């Protein structure tokens, strides 16, 4: 976890994320107060989740996202309705062992023709539903599959290489205002920038506490949970990810997550 000074806390051997997120916010702060620090650049980073950490995601939380979903979909009215509805759109995205970390490959489906990264602020909640940290999430998506029929959302969102998180978790106590964070994304192809986008969490239509409150309404997460909070940086229609691309997402004060792109589940091996 990244602290106020930008150093990574070195947790004791056999300490995992789930055991930390089972603590209250005050207990977590106390547990992390005296652990040794190391420069982030000195360590090889993996996705900051446990194998059993659940990653969920929120949809249509920005005006630009509503417009993009309505544009791509054969049934556009439902996206307009959910944007203004009392209940947000929440969906399961990935289990921890499937999540890519910094420099790990992400993937696109072989049966999709329009695939995009979705740069999102991730909130890290403890078992008591308190937001205790923030991270960067890439909610990789098939716009062609979701656009064909909204009921295909699980296939458009959940597949091999469809989720990346990292490079670390920034403690919530070190983030002054989560609603004033710039988000930048770019797709690199053949060492050139194919597309870039920029947005800010100031454009969020819903509050973070609202999203997490709904997430915890119907279930418990005794080892914590990560919730990606939606995107407002949407590539233009002619842009689609292909194998060999590289996606780079940067969120102010949180970190930079970069991943190469593969195509098809077989490309990942067994």
Image (cartoon, helix red, strand yellow):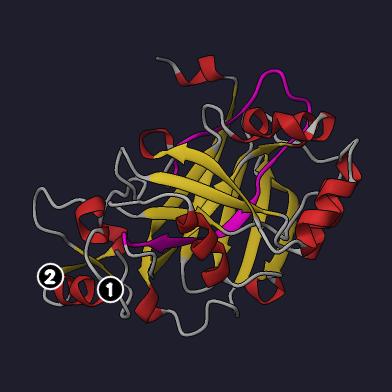
Residue 216 in picture, x, y percent from top left: 45, 57
Query: Can residue 65 be seen in this snapshot?
Result: no
Q: Is residue 239 magenta?
A: no
Crowd band around label 2 with a 10 angstrom C-alpha radius: few (<14), some (14–19), many (20+):
few
* Residue drawn at point x = 59 percent, y = 78 percent: 179
Say which element carries label 1: helix
First along the sequence among labels 2 and 1: 1
Q: Quadrant of the N terminus?
A: bottom left
Asked if residue 109 is positioned above or below residue 169 in the image, the reply reads above
- Percent x, y of residue 269: 43, 16
Examine the structure image and report whether residue 113 is included in the region drawn in magenta. yes
To which residue does mark 1 refer? Answer: 25
Q: Residue at x 76, y 53 (%)?
A: 234
Residue that appears at 76% across and 29% down? 145
- Front residue of 95/24: it is 24
Give the residues in magenta: 103-127
Q: Position of residue 257 (x, y in %)?
A: 49, 53
Taking the view exactly as shown, the residue that stands out farthest to the front is: 218
Residue 26 located left or right of residue 170: left
Q: Which residue is mark 2?
A: 35
């Amino acid at each position: 976890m990244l602290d106020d000074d930008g150093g990574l806390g070195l947790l004791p051997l056999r300490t995992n994320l789930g055991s930390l997120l089972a603590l209250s916010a005050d207990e977590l702060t106390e547990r992390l107060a005296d652990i040794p620090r190391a420069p982030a650049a000195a360590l090889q980073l993996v996705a900051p989740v446990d194998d059993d950490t659940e990653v969920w995601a929120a949809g249509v939380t920005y005006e630009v996202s509503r417009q993009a979903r309505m544009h791509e979909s054969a049934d556009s009215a439902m996206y307009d309705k959910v944007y203004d509805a009392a209940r947000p759109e929440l969906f399961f995205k990935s289990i921890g062992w499937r999540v890519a970390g910094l420099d790990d490959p992400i993937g696109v489906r072989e049966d999709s023709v329009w695939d995009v990264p979705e740069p999102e602020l991730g909130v890290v909640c403890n078992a008591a539903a308190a937001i205790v940290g923030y991270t960067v999430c890439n909610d990789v998506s098939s716009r062609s599959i979701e656009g064909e029929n909204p009921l295909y959302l699980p296939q458009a969102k959940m597949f091999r290489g469809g989720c990346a998180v990292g490079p670390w978790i920034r403690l919530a106590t070190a983030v002054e205002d989560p609603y004033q964070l710039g988000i930048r994304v770019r797709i690199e192809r053949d060492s050139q920038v194919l597309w870039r986008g920029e947005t800010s969490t100031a454009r969020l239509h819903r509050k973070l506490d609202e999203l997490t409150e709904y997430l915890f309404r119907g279930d418990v997460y005794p080892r914590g949970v990560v919730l990606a909070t939606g995107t407002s940086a949407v590539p233009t229609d002619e842009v689609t990810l292909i194998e060999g691309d590289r996606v780079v997402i940067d969120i102010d004060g949180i970190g930079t997550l970069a991943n190469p792109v593969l195509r098809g589940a077989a490309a990942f091996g067994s």
